[in-house]
């Protein structure tokens, strides 16, 4: 069995048969279940929520978490390959699964009480329950520590007030992981359930990117929750940031998948499309574009493979994830644009995926750490100096 997509450096030889089989299963799911409906949902600005349980049945929600936590217990590389394939379908699909696994199931698994784990993880893993992650606010994106959302102790309960912005799956979610500051300024995580008094969500409309994804604003007005709704085993900004490290790892893989989908679409087209009596693939300028794209894709493949092995060994660092997220967004952004050029006028219609990927990547380029913030994380890692400190 071989890696699906370009494999110029024989990366297949580095993968297990199980990992290759998992990629094949994810690829078939995307081709058979998702690609036939993506254009309709992209145009309407909706997400095909009916596939949530199918993702769960295949073990694609929180796949690398242990089975007792709702996952499938697969390797981090296998999990990366799943998100790689989901992103080949669309960023909206990968975002849905990534939020569910990395930003909702992971913090409950890592920081939740036994009661919280029993209540939520199996349902989230099966796709029967949906979750979201509330960290970003309208005035606090790159500086989440400045959040204005508060959690005040009132007897045995907490009273939560504030709002969260740009929340994937927000209005779909049965449970939201919401981060808030207590009276001492300590950031804490809470599990807020749909239907709680004072807890509402509104979808954000008019998006020109990531359209096949539900993006919402969460509002909390005097939401009273018991202390049992608090994640008991974490406090401080390291809680949400550790979750983002998990999600950014998936983005690094996903961007390779998006780049490969654009590359393969343009390659197939260039071999069929003729100008001046020969395929446009036969021209030097076209071949130079493919040579550069293949080089960047191969380097990105090797990066995420090694990053996944480091993750499985417990050696992965957050700054290593920043390098991959930052670099692969740039690569995928450039490749999507180049592929659109190769497709010519046909590149702007929905029959071909590069322009849809190109629009989506503008969102991925910004969310879960902007390009600039990941540059500063790497800068601090290199120099030992935090340039963003006041």
Image (cartoon, helix red, strand yellow):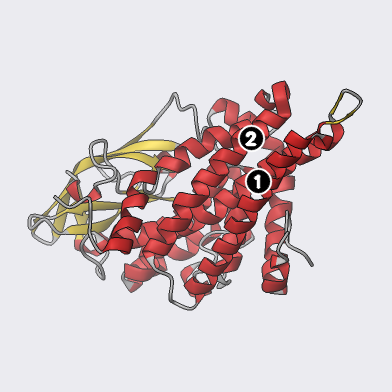
Q: Position of residue 85 (x, y in %)?
A: 64, 53
Q: Position of residue 335 (x, y in %)?
A: 61, 40
Residue receiving disc 1:
293
Say which of 63 and 381 sits in front.
381
Q: Residue furthest front?
A: 284
What's the residue at 65%, 24% (across, down)? 348
What kind of element bears circle 2? helix
Say which of 9 and 153 sits in front.
9
Q: Residues within 10 Å of mark 1 (few under 14, many from 20)?
A: many
Q: Quadrant of residue 92?
A: top right
Q: Is residue 319 left or right of residue 276?
A: left
Say which of 174 and 76 sits in front.
76
Let me know if residue 344 appears in the view.
yes
Q: CA distance from mark 2 to mark 1?
A: 9 Å
Q: Quadrant of residue 110?
A: bottom left
Q: Is residue 350 left or right of residue 274?
A: left
What's the residue at 73%, 59% (across, down)? 8
Q: Looking at the image, how many numbered discs can be counted on the residues?
A: 2
Residue receiving disc 2:
338
What kind of element bears circle 1? helix
Let me know if residue 129 appears in the view.
no
The answer to whether 132 is drawn above or below residue 117 in the figure is above
Q: Position of residue 322 (x, y in %)?
A: 41, 57
What's the residue at 49%, 73% (across, down)? 310
The answer to whether 66 is drawn above or below residue 231 in the figure is below
The disc, 2 or 1, on the residue closer to the chain's N-terminal end is 1
Task: State the mark number for residue 377.
Answer: none
State the quadrant of the N terminus. Answer: bottom right
Q: Residues within 10 Å of mark 2 (few under 14, many from 20)?
A: many
The answer to whether 66 is drawn above or below residue 188 in the figure is below
Q: Residue furthest bottom?
A: 313
**Do residues under tags 2 and 1 come within 8 Å of each other at their CB atoms?**
yes
């Amino acid at each position: 069995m071989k890696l699906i997509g370009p494999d110029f450096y024989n990366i297949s030889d580095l993968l297990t048969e199980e990992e290759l089989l998992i990629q094949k299963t994810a690829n078939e799911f995307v081709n058979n279940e998702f690609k036939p409906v993506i254009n309709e949902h992209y145009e309407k600005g909706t997400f095909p929520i009916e596939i949530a349980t199918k993702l769960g049945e295949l073990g694609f929600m929180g796949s690398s978490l242990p089975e007792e936590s709702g996952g499938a217990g697969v390797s981090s590389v296998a999990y990366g390959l799943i998100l790689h394939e989901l992103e080949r379908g669309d960023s909206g699909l990968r975002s849905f699964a990534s939020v569910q696994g990395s930003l909702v199931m992971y913090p409950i698994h890592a920081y939740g009480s036994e009661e919280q784990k029993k209540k939520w993880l199996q349902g989230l893993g099966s796709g029967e329950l949906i979750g979201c992650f509330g960290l970003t606010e309208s005035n606090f994106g790159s500086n989440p520590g400045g959040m204005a959302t508060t959690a005040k102790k009132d007897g045995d309960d907490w009273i939560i007030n504030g709002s969260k912005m740009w929340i994937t799956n927000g209005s779909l979610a049965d449970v939201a992981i919401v981060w808030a500051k207590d009276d001492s300024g300590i950031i804490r995580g809470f599990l807020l359930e749909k239907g709680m008094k004072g807890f509402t969500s509104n979808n954000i409309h008019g998006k020109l990117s990531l359209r096949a994804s539900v993006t919402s604003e969460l509002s909390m007005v005097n939401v009273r929750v018991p202390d049992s709704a608090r994640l008991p085993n974490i406090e401080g900004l390291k809680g949400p940031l550790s979750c983002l490290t998990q999600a950014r790892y998936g983005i690094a893989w996903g961007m390779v998948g998006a780049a490969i989908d654009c590359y393969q679409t343009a390659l197939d087209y260039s071999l069929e499309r003729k100008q001046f009596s020969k395929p446009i693939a036969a021209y030097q300028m076209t071949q130079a574009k493919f040579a550069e794209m293949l080089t960047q894709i191969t380097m990105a493949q090797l990066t995420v493979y090694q990053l996944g092995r480091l993750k499985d060994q417990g050696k992965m660092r957050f700054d290593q994830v920043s390098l991959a997220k930052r670099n692969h967004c740039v690569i995928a952004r450039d490749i999507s644009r180049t592929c659109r050029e190769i497709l010519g006028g046909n590149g702007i219609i929905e029959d071909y995926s590069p322009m849809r990927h190109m629009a989506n990547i503008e969102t991925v380029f910004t969310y879960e750490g902007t390009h600039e913030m990941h540059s500063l994380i790497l800068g601090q890692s290199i120099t030992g100096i935090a340039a963003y400190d006041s």
